[in-house]
Image: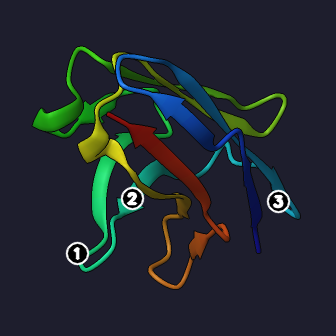
Amino acid sequence: QVQLVESGGGLVQFGGSLRLSCEASGSGIRAYDMGWYRQAPGKERELVTSISRRGRTNYADSVKGRFSMSRDNAKNTVDLQMNSLKPEDTAVYYCNAKGPIIEQDYWGQGTQVTVSS
């Protein structure tokens, strides 16, 4: 099993930056595809970005060029650097780990990001 804890959320002004971190414990993340999701009030949870166990990244169109995800398998962490933030980026951001077995699907508790206009 993997336990995930996000940190780094907060309130930021339009155009500002935040860096989210997700720390894993219980099992190393080397064998997991990692992702960041977000859920805004009244909306469904959506994939923001993911990074495969081989390091290949994927970004939602809405964040391309502004967000950057990285992973450090040695430290069991994944980070999300968010630049040029917009009010529409306001949401609870969740870290996710998906293993090779379908039951290996783990979530953090989420961290709130609020972007003021």
- Tell which tag, 1 or 2, sits nearer the viewer: 1
- Which residue has dot 3 on it? 27
Label 3 sits on a secondary structure element that is loop
Residue kind at label 2, given as amino acid type: Arg
- Outermost residue on the left side: it is 61
Do callouts 1 and 2 mark residues in contact (Cβ within 8 Å)?
Answer: no
The picture places residue 90, in percent across and down from the top left corner, at 38, 50
- Tell which tag, 3 or 2, sits nearer the viewer: 2
- Which residue has dot 2 on it? 38
Q: Label 2: how many residues lie within 10 Å, few (<14), some (14-19) or many (20+)?
A: many
Q: Label 3: how many residues lie within 10 Å, few (<14), some (14-19) or many (20+)?
A: few
- Closer-to-camera residue (60/86): 86
The picture places residue 8, in percent across and down from the top left corner, at 70, 38
The picture places residue 18, in percent across and down from the top left corner, at 56, 26
Label 2 sits on a secondary structure element that is strand
- Tell which tag, 3 or 1, sits nearer the viewer: 1
Circle nearer the N terminus (1, 2): 2
Residue kind at label 3, given as amino acid type: Ser
Q: CA distance from mark 3 to mark 1?
A: 31 Å
Q: Which corner quadrant holds the C terminus?
A: top left
73 above or below 30? above
- Which residue has dot 1 on it? 43
Q: Is residue 11 left or right of residue 87?
A: right
Which residue is located at x 72 percent, y 32 percent?
Answer: 73
Which residue is located at x 26 percent, y 34 percent?
Answer: 58
36 above or below 54? below
Q: Which corner quadrant holds the N terminus?
A: bottom right
Q: CA distance from mark 3 to mark 2?
A: 24 Å
Which residue is located at x 11 percent, y 35 percent?
Answer: 61
Circle nearer the N terminus (3, 1): 3
Which residue is located at x 46 percent, y 18 percent?
Answer: 16
